[in-house]
Image (cartoon, rainbow, N blue to C red):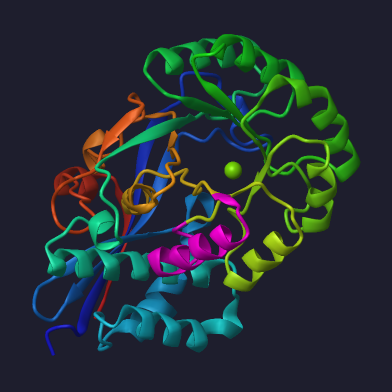
Amino acid sequence: MPNTIERIELARVSVPFEIDGPRNGLRPGLAPWTRMEALIVRVHFRDGACGWGEAFGHFSNAGTAAILENLVAPWFIGKDGSAIATVMDQAERAFYGFGRNGPVRYALSAIDIALWDVAAQRAGLPLYRLLGGNRQEIQRYASFARYGGDTDVVAANTAKAAEAGFAMIKLHESTLPAFLAARAAAGDRARVALDVNCPWTVEEARTMARRIAAEDFEWLEEPVWPPEDYDGMARLRQEGVPIAAGENVTTLHDFKRLFEARAVDVVQPSVIKAGGITAMRKVYALAESYTVRVAPHCYFWGPGYLATAHLIAADPRSMLLETPYITLQAPAVNPAFDARSGKMTLPSVPGLGFVPDEAALARHTVWSAVVA
Ligand SMILES: [Mg+2]
């Protein structure tokens, strides 16, 4: 059978990056974050077709790589990779006991993206066209690194991103002076969203929401600890600041609980966490039924970045593509990743269009395996 999956290559690709700011805020209490790693899969079919995918991510990659090598990738060998809905459903059932959220699901996400890459190649269409879209041009938003509350850096980078044509910037700060510095620097040139990464109790978050309610921020993201306190977010939402969350939600039923709780205005599923393109399409449909906007999580540079771009291009409501505002020291690992421009033209080649310089990819590979 030509559609049989024959071999799966796995690689952890680690690329040094600059953030245009102080690094001490990236991982408080830990060593500075200086390399951004992508866990990349390449799925080969018997007839020679092959597709790229990516699993989340960053500091958890060693675990997900082991899960891929020893559990998930071997299961897919010999399966019909063209029957994506069927094979992904079977895989979810096969592995459900090992965690519905976490490395197993990240691993499944990577395989699913690679299967969609091949499906689009076989259809002779860029993936966004196969998904029903027709916009080749989309807009990016600049997702800043965490600058440790440095208001000068926040203001300077906000101004620089606005000048480069980004219609929105997102902070990863959690202090009022940083929020206001970005707001002032952006003026009416760019929207400002706030991603605070779950620091507050519901009451602390309500206090902050009251302070910023008049400042017209685009959204306040993951304000509450723990992230699964959907009822707490629903109470916070009554303060009138739009609430965003969802990058740490994976199953369809958990998204349904998030929506049922009326916890969010904007949902942020992550294609490399939640189950790939197959899962994202279901979340998009479910979110529409609750009139929740979808703004996918995308703090990565590899095949998952392109998968997210295609989903956005296929969505009739335009939303911006989250793009880490960083400089990769080896941009050839993914020429489609460009954090210096607010506009993106999707690749016109069939499939995902992930076309790395393979020598650059190999040079930055810190671990690899082949499962056959
Ligand atoms: Mg976030």
Name the residue: 37% across, 33% down: 139
* Left or right, 314 with reference to 242: left
Nearest to the observer: residue 23 or residue 138: 138
Quarter of the figure with residue 200: top right
Name of the residue lying farthest toward the left: 47
Please identify the quadrant where the N terminus is shown.
Answer: bottom left
Q: Position of residue 133 (x, y in %)?
A: 29, 53
Name the residue: 82% across, 23% down: 211
Residue 280 magenta-drawn? Answer: yes
- Asked if 150 appears above or below 138 in the picture, the reply is above
Nearest to the observer: residue 95 or residue 288: 288
- Asked if 284 appears above or below 99 in the picture, the reply is above
Residue 30 showing in the rendered view? yes
* Left or right, 283 with reference to 30: left
Residue 5 magenta-drawn? Answer: no
Please identify the quadrant where the C terminus is shown.
Answer: bottom left
**Residue stretch in magenta:** 271-293
**Ligand 1 positioned in quadrant:** top right
- Asked if 28 appears above or below 82 in the picture, the reply is above
Quarter of the figure with residue 102: bottom right
Residue 369 showing in the rendered view? no
Name the residue: 20% across, 64% down: 120
Q: Main secondary structure of the magenta part?
A: helix
Q: Looking at the image, how many numbered discs can be counted on the residues?
A: 0
Q: Position of residue 148 (x, y in %)?
A: 65, 24
Q: Position of residue 182 (x, y in %)?
A: 61, 16
